[in-house]
């Protein structure tokens, strides 16, 4: 039984806990803690998953296997809070959306095995103690530091739970492009993903955003179909889903816009590419004044 540590208790944190619950000991790390255990029910299987609950200050042992399942804007601070507990051969899996947070964490913690995961798993919390595993997906994982290797990861993460990529960068970029085209618009128009391609004015807005994304993609070493095509496909496949940014907005939580559209705008500026539509998107989302 290996001790697995998970930063966060949101939907992804709980889903990952369920991958281990039969074989390993789960230790959740939360900002504040009222109880020594954290349990939830996984639906639709009704499996009950239980782990120890700690704060960064109360963990009694060194951390060897760490899953960072916080939002992108919290990830670096969350790891820093347990930095003194990382064992020299620690392995860290980053589950964040967007781009930027994983790269700066990998830089700061380059002596450890750091992995990035881009997940297509669908899960959401029905209430704090109930997780709905809504759609089986794939955890695409690759290395962000020299120490991170597929064989090392397979020693603790069940091989059925991930697909290894020698180069994770195209996977992260593809998801970033899709998130840029879909997520902010679903919050602005207050709609499910599928609606964006049904309503002509929304579809036009998505096209305008995608045109700027395509100009950036032209400068990158990837061979992707155009951004609008990528986004349209995902809108069709996930027509009834509410995007993660929509859900953050509806729960009055801060969004990951700085790590999604914000990252794209920074990249466009590096290449001196104009991106007025994406800048407007950031401003519209920021005007909503979400979060604490
Ligand atoms: O962020 C999300 O919600 C998802 O990545 C996506 C693909 C937009 C589907 O809802």
Image (spheres, helix red, strand yellow):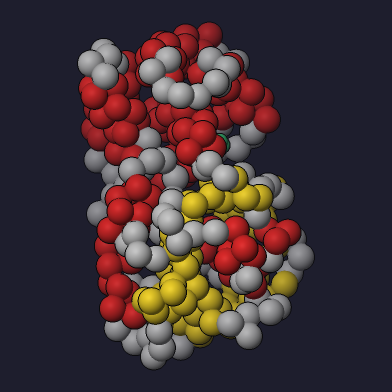
Residue at the outermost right position: 45
Residue 182 seen by the camera:
no
The vertical placement of 87 against 176, above or below, is: below
> In the image shown, does 280 or 246 lie closer to the viewer?
280
The image quarter containing residue 199 is top right
The vertical placement of 229 against 179, above or below, is: above
Q: Which residue does the image show at 54% across and 37% down from the upper left?
A: 171
In x, y percent, where is residue 78? 32, 65
- Quick one: quadrant of the N terminus? bottom right
- Quick one: quadrant of the C terminus? bottom left
In x, y percent, where is residue 62? 40, 84
In the image, 5: left or right of 284?
A: right
Residue 193 seen by the camera:
yes
> In the image shown, does 100 or 231 lie closer to the viewer?
100
In x, y percent, where is residue 33? 37, 80
Residue at the outermost bottom position: 60
Q: Which residue does the image show at 73% across and 59% down from the upper left?
A: 160
């Amino acid at each position: 039984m290996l001790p697995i540590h998970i930063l966060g208790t949101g939907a992804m944190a709980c889903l990952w806990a369920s991958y281990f619950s039969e074989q390993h000991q789960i230790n959740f790390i939360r900002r504040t803690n009222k109880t020594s255990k954290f349990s939830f029910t996984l639906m639709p299987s009704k499996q009950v998953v239980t782990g120890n609950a700690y704060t960064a200050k109360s963990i009694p042992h060194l951390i060897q296997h760490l899953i960072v399942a916080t939002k992108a804007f919290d990830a670096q601070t969350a790891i820093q809070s347990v930095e003194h507990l990382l064992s020299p051969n620690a392995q860290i899996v980053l589950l964040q959306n967007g781009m930027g947070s994983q790269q700066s964490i990998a830089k700061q913690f380059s002596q450890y095995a750091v992995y990035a995961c881009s997940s297509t798993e669908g899960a959401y919390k029905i209430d704090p103690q109930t997780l709905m595993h809504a759609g089986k997906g794939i955890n695409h994982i690759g290395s962000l530091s020299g120490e991170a290797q597929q064989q090392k990861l397979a020693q603790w993460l069940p091989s059925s739970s991930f697909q290894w990529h020698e180069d994770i960068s195209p996977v992260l970029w593809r998801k970033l492009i899709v998130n840029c085209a879909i997520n902010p618009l679903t919050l602005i128009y207050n709609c499910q993903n599928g609606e964006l391609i049904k309503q002509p004015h929304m579809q036009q807005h998505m096209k305008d955003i995608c045109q700027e994304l395509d100009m950036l993609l032209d400068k990158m070493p990837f061979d992707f179909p155009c951004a609008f095509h990528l986004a349209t496909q995902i809108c069709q496949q996930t027509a009834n889903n509410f995007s993660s940014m929509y859900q953050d907005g509806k729960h009055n939580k801060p969004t990951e816009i700085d790590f999604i559209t914000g990252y794209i705008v920074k990249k466009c500026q590096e290449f001196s590419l104009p991106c007025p539509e994406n800048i407007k998107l950031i401003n519209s989302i920021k005007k909503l004044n979400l979060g604490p």
